[in-house]
Image: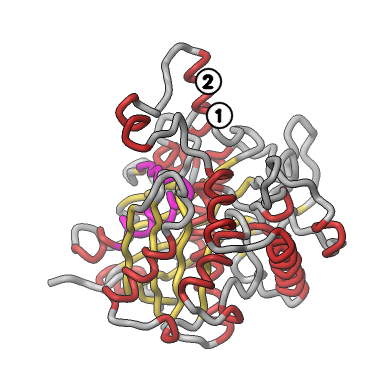
Amino acid sequence: MTQEAFIVAATRTAGGRRGGRLSGWHPVDLAAEVINELVERTNADPSLIDDVIMGCVQQIGEQSVNIGRNAVLASKLPNSVPGTSVDRQCGSSQQALHFAAQAVMSGTMDCVIAAGVESMSRIPMTAPGPVALKAGLGQYMSPQIQENFGVTGFTQFLGAEMMAEKYDISKDAMDNYAYQTTLKSIAAINAGHFDNEILSLQARIKDMPAGDEIHSIDEGVRFNASLEAISGLNVLQEGGRITAGTASQICDGASGVMVVNAAGLKALGVEPLARIHHMSVLGHDPVIMLEAPIPATEHALKKAGMSIDDIDLFEVNEAFASVPMAWLQASGADPERLNINGGAIALGHPLGGSGTKLMTTLVHSLQRTGKRYGLQTMCEGGGMANVTIIERL
C-alpha cells in the first residue's frame, strides 16, 4: 500500500553574492551544515537517516565525485548513511525531494534528506563545458541532437528572450516586475519572514581570513533598488529585452528538507509541517527551454484533480522575469499568491540548491500564513519542469 510523504524540517542558508559572504565555504561543507541543521531541528537519531539525495548542477572540481556522499562525510551523520547526487539542472534539488518522497512512499525507506547546494563563486556557471572542451573531451551536443533541433547549442538567455517575445512581455514590464519582487524581498526580510527558515552561518569570504560576522540575510537583495536604476540597465543582447536586472542573481547557497513516512514520524517522534500532495515532472521544447513550467503546471493540476484557484501560494522560480510573467499569463493564477516573499531576481538562484530553497520558503510561508496548499515549479535546462504540490499540516 502506498504511504504518504511528510516534510518534517526545512532549512536554507541565506544566499551569498558572487565573491561574497559564503564564497569562502567549500560547497561540501556548506551542504553538510544544512544536513546537520535538519537533524538538529528534528532532534533525530542520525542513524535513522536512510539516505541523503543532493541536487547540484555544476558537478566538477569541489562539487564532483558524488557531492551528496561527500556532504554526508563532512557532516555529523555516521558513515553508514549513504548519499547520492542528482542533476536535473535548476530543478536538481526539487527532483531530489521527489526521489526522497518516492522512497518513503514506497516503504523502502522511512527517513530521507533531500537537499541541494551550489557555490557559483567557486564553480562558475557552465564551468564543466569549457573545462571539458579544453581537455579535448568534447561537448554534450551530439550531432543527432543538433540535427533534431536545428541548433548548435541550447541557451537559457535565448529561451528567456523567446518567452518574452512569445507572450508579448515588454522590457518595461519586466523591469517593473523585477522592482516589485525586490520590494517584496525587502519587506519579507524586514518583517522577519525568513527568520525561521534560515540557518545562520559564519561569513567566510574566499581568500580572506575568517572573522566573527554571521551571515543570516540574503546578500543579493538591493535595499537601495529603484525602478529608474533597473530600467537603466542595458539589455544582455542587441535587440533583446532581458537585462541583468531582470535575470536571477548568481548565488552561493545550500538548502534541504527532511522527508519521512508514517513509520518515520513515529521513529523520530516529530510532527509534520506539510504533506506532499502531488509531484510530477514534464519535458518540453529544449530550444525555448524555459516554457516547461506552463504545461507542467497544467499537467500537475489535472493529475491532482485541482484547479489553479485551489492553490493558496505559488513559488515559481524567477530564472528570468519573463518566466513567472508568462506563467501567470498562461495559468490565470492570482498574482498576489505568487512569490509573496520575492524571488531569485532579488534573492539569488543557487542552481542545484534552489529546488529545496523554494520548498523551504513555501513550507514556512504556509505555516506563517495558515494557508493550505502550495505549488512549486521551476524551469530547467533541456526544457523540463518539476511541479510539487504540498498541503500544510
Q: Secondary structure at mark 2?
A: helix
Q: Nearer the viewer, residue 125 or 9?
A: 125
| Marks 1/2: CA–CA distance | 6 Å
Decide: marks 1, 2 in contact (CB < 8 A)? yes
**Front-most of residues 337 and 389:** 337
Query: Label 2 crowding class (10 Å Cα cut-off): few <14, some 14-19, many 20+?
Result: some
Instruction: Report whether 188 appears left or right of 390.
Output: right
Magenta-drawn stretch contains 243: no
Residue 15 seen by the camera: no
Task: Return the x and y of residue 167 as percentages of the image width and height.
Answer: 54, 63
Where does the image place residue 135, in percent across and percent down from the top left? Answer: 48, 12
- Above-or-below relation of 329 to 384: below
Q: Is residue 138 above or below residue 308?
A: above
Q: Quadrant of residue 215?
A: bottom right
Res 219 visible:
yes
Nearer to me, 45 or 57 = 57
Give the residue displayed 44% in from the left and 82% down from the top.
Answer: 311
User: Which residue is disc 2 drawn over?
Assistant: 131
Q: Position of residue 66 (x, y in %)?
A: 40, 35
What residue appears at the point 59 percent right and 78 percent down from the top-left corner?
335
Queried whether the magenta region covers residue 96, the answer comes back as yes
Q: Say above or below: 192 vs 110.
A: below
Residue type for callout 2: Val
Q: Which residue is mark 1?
A: 127
Read off the magenta span. Answer: 84-101
Looking at the picture, how far across and down is residue 133, in whole percent?
49, 17
Question: On the rendered image, what quadrant is the N terminus found in?
Answer: bottom left
